[in-house]
Amino acid sequence: DSGVTQTPKHLITATGQRVTLRCSPRSGDLSVYWYQQSLDQGLQFLIQYYNGEERAKGNILERFSAQQFPDLHSELNLSSLELGDSALYFCASSVVASAGTGELFFGEGSRLTVL
Amino acid sequence: GNSVTQMEGPVTLSEEAFLTINCTYTATGYPSLFWYVQYPGEGLQLLLKATKADDKGSNKGFEATYRKETTSFHLEKGSVQVSDSAVYFCAEGGGYQKVTFGTGTKLQVIP
């Protein structure tokens, strides 16, 4: 158990809909990262928050947004969903602000299926 | 941007065979290098890491050496077990903000 909790584990929805994925980081970790894992594109970095503020942005679509709350949990909002958004979405946390120097702890992921 | 290239899978080996999974990176300077493993139905977990040139990371019988001259961080294990079946990801922490992952190599070990 990594200590990172993601909900829901599975989600099935229709095109055009909006969903919210939730992540609770390990106790004491200030950084939260969101990654998208699809079959053909591997693990893609979406966005990072550190202590409530956006720290880095990767290949995140404009239809997607995220935030980190004062209690450090984070939510990833996906809107106007398309078939291609079907993927496994991982949240990871780390104690440090710089991911490159520290270990990332991953949740089990949220599997999104868009029909 | 930075990228990490690792050998495509799936790799199928018999139990007790020798494993090598190749990995090269493009980041300049001295990024930290990682191998993560993803067992079926689980999230990624850190397997080993190295933070400077010539460092050797090791864990659970797996090893990888940080080769600056060839920008490589190949994963090796002398004798694989069925329980090693998983997807292995090479990654580099060259950027201040994020870790860049390779596409993953699926390993299947058969008895």
Image (cartoon, rainbow, N blue to C red):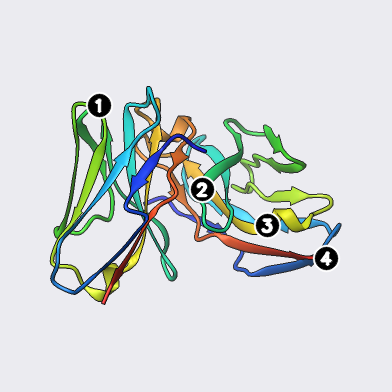
Amino acid type of disc 2? Leu
Q: Name the residue located 24 percent from the left edge and 55 percent from the top edge.
A: A60
CB under 8 Å between callouts 1 and 3?
A: no
Q: Which residue corresponds to mark 1? A: A51
Residue A69 percent coordinates (x, y): 19, 32
- For disc 2, the neighbor class at 10 Å (few under 14, some 14 to 19, many from 20) is many
Q: Which residue corresponds to mark 3? A: B21
Q: Which residue corresponds to mark 2? A: B44
SS category of the residue bearing label 2: strand
Which quadrant of the figure contains the C terminus of chain B? bottom right
CA gap, disc 2 and disc 3: 17 Å
Q: Name the residue located 54 percent from the left edge and 43 percent from the top edge.
A: B45
- For disc 1, the neighbor class at 10 Å (few under 14, some 14 to 19, many from 20) is some
SS category of the residue bearing label 3: strand
Circle nearer the viewer, 3 or 4: 4
SS category of the residue bearing label 4: loop
Circle nearer the viewer, 4 or 1: 4
SS category of the residue bearing label 1: loop
**Discs 4 and 1 lie in a common subunit:** no
**Discs 2 and 3 lie in a common subunit:** yes
Q: Name the residue located 67 percent from the left edge and 62 percent from the top edge.
A: B107
Most extreme residue toward the right, as rendered? B16
Say which of B5 and A89 sits in front: A89
